[in-house]
Amino acid sequence: MASGGLRRIRPWLLLAGVALWSQVTCSHAITASAADPARHRLAQIDAIRTKDHTRFLAMMAELHRDADSLTPYEKRYMRFLDGWEANYEGRYKESIDTLRGVIAEAEDDALGTRATATLMNTLTGQGKYAEAYAMATRAADTLPSVTDPVARFVLLANLSQMLTFAGQPRVALEYADMMLKATPPGVSRCEALVQKVVALEGARQLTSDSPELRETIDVCKTGGLPLFSDTMSLIQIDRLLEERKLDEALETVRRITPDVEASRYFPHLVDLSSARARIYEAMGNATEARKAALATVAMNHPGDTNEALRFAYRVLYSIDKAQGHYASALEYYEDYVVQDQGYLRDANVRTAAYEAASQHFRAEKLETEGLSKENRILRLQQALDGKAVETSRLYMVVMAILLLSIVFWMVRVKRSQLRFKWLSSCDSLTGIFNHQHFMTESARALRTLEKRSGEGCLIFLDLDHFKQVNDTHGHATGDLLLKHVVALCKGQLRKADLLGRLGGEEFGMLLMDAPRLQGTVVAERIRLALAASPLIVDAGTVSFSGSIGLACTDTCGHDMQRLFRASDAALYRAKRNGRNRVVVDGEGDDGRASPASIASAPSRAS
């Protein structure tokens, strides 16, 4: 259950960038606005967003009380700060709407660029990658024309971060180097160094001792930017864990815990708890690892998908499995799979969105450059035919609604048909083929084998003393045992093999392209798996075994009825000779050939 060699970019590395933009204008904006008291006040509020967030909120409340006295630009600046704060607190829809309003009113200035950068990060954090990368692609095209030092710095930072998140760390590293050179006077190098470290992390070029990582932590601490030094420390913890430097990793966790708790920045809090769980697990301290993993799960909300949860569920699964708590371990494994698949799905969407945005922008640019005259003619024609276009659009909307209704109805009908088909062919308790469907599919498969001269084996499995399980532990436990047996059998079968419940505690398996020796080995493996895997329930452990009869096409041919009778007779001999054994048709009890007639085999008892 290791996390594997693929190094993942954490979502909080992106979201931390929302706070990063706030530092860009600190001393630069304060100095530039000193002559204007109102703007100077706004720049001071802007400068303390992450340094002293409590004071920032208090000053924003005072600013809103004085909103009537602000100029239009100052009100727009205030709304930008509102949009940033909404993102920081997780009110993403409000943040997106507010920032879009600021951008709609903006001229080509630094505030408009900052609002665009923050909006791109908010959209990316919410998984709206198509719009985010479309904005980023257009912003990259405008970079040569951006002369304002603050706007250029913000744009470079945003592009570096967005490209890292899209799986383009090489290009992101180039933007980070440009950002270092373009750092405005009075602005800490911390922000640019953070982007460089994140790009190096995405490019798998980072270790716990990398000079870039240690330098960035020191610069951010010296510059009074704990949020970013904590981000770098969390990356360092990941590297220490991967390098198995567990004592150093735990010490780093303890060192940054006060700063992380003081910032109350949720992504850092949950990732720190997850890191603690992984460290203790690697140290063999299952108690502390479980405690930290459960704390990580408790911090999140239903439906959340993130790397911290993925690690936490993996730790919980590993601990419960090692301690023999198989039921809870299975539940944690299912949660782990959801988190793992959620990340992979999200990564694929990000990459696809970036590629689509880049291709669309290139095509759009070529079209704009090559067809400018034709576009002007088309716009004139569109203006003349406006009414006709509105009518056709309405018609298209009506047709689209009708088409969607038909598709929806067809989907529902198809789902119902598939459901009924499943119910008619599968056993409702175990989910495998029922008796009739197993016999039908097996006969069809045998005919296919016969056409290509393939060999196959039919296995009959009957649980020993199953009635005693029901009488002793109850029918609910008996049902759990049947499901458990199906899971064990599936673990020994291939994808092409067939499995069905023939009735009660009896199961049938058809091994495709399996000669007699291979079929005997598989049957023995199934018998050993059953004997070695007791069912664990609240009331205790339920041990059980199974008797197995096997018949092969090399002696019985490819006729399903003959194979059925032969397997049935072999199963009867297995139960008659003491149960918990495999008997192969055509062999005596001592393994030698037996001339017993298949047709005369008596019926067996449970």
Image (spheres, rainbow, N blue to C red):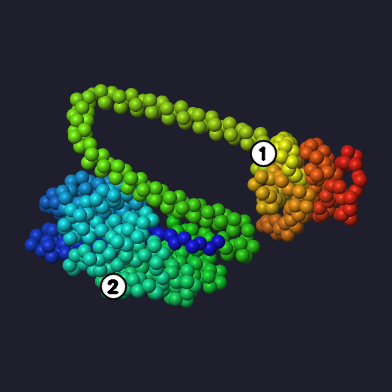
Relative to 241, say whether 479 is above or below. Answer: above
State the SS at label 1.
loop
C-alpha separation, residue under disc 2 versus residue under disc 1: 64 Å
Which residue, given by chain and number where applicable, does mark 2 sit on?
Answer: 219
- Does 550 sit left or right of 358 as displayed? right
Q: Residues within 10 Å of mark 2 (few under 14, many from 20)?
A: some
- Choose between 554 and 349: the one closer to the eye: 554
Which residue, given by chain and number where applicable, does mark 1 sit on?
Answer: 426
Relative to 307, say whether 95 is above or below. Answer: above
Q: Between disc 2 and disc 1, whose residue precedes?
A: 2
- Does 10 sit left or right of 594 as displayed? left
- Does 381 sit left or right of 129 as displayed? left
- Choose between 8 and 530: the one closer to the eye: 8
- Choose between 316 and 373: the one closer to the eye: 373
- Identified at 47% across, 58% down, the residue is 309
* Image x and y of residue 469, in percent: 76, 51
- Identified at 64% across, 47% down, the residue is 495
Q: How crowded is mark 1: few (under 14 residues within 10 Å), some or many (20 or more)?
A: some
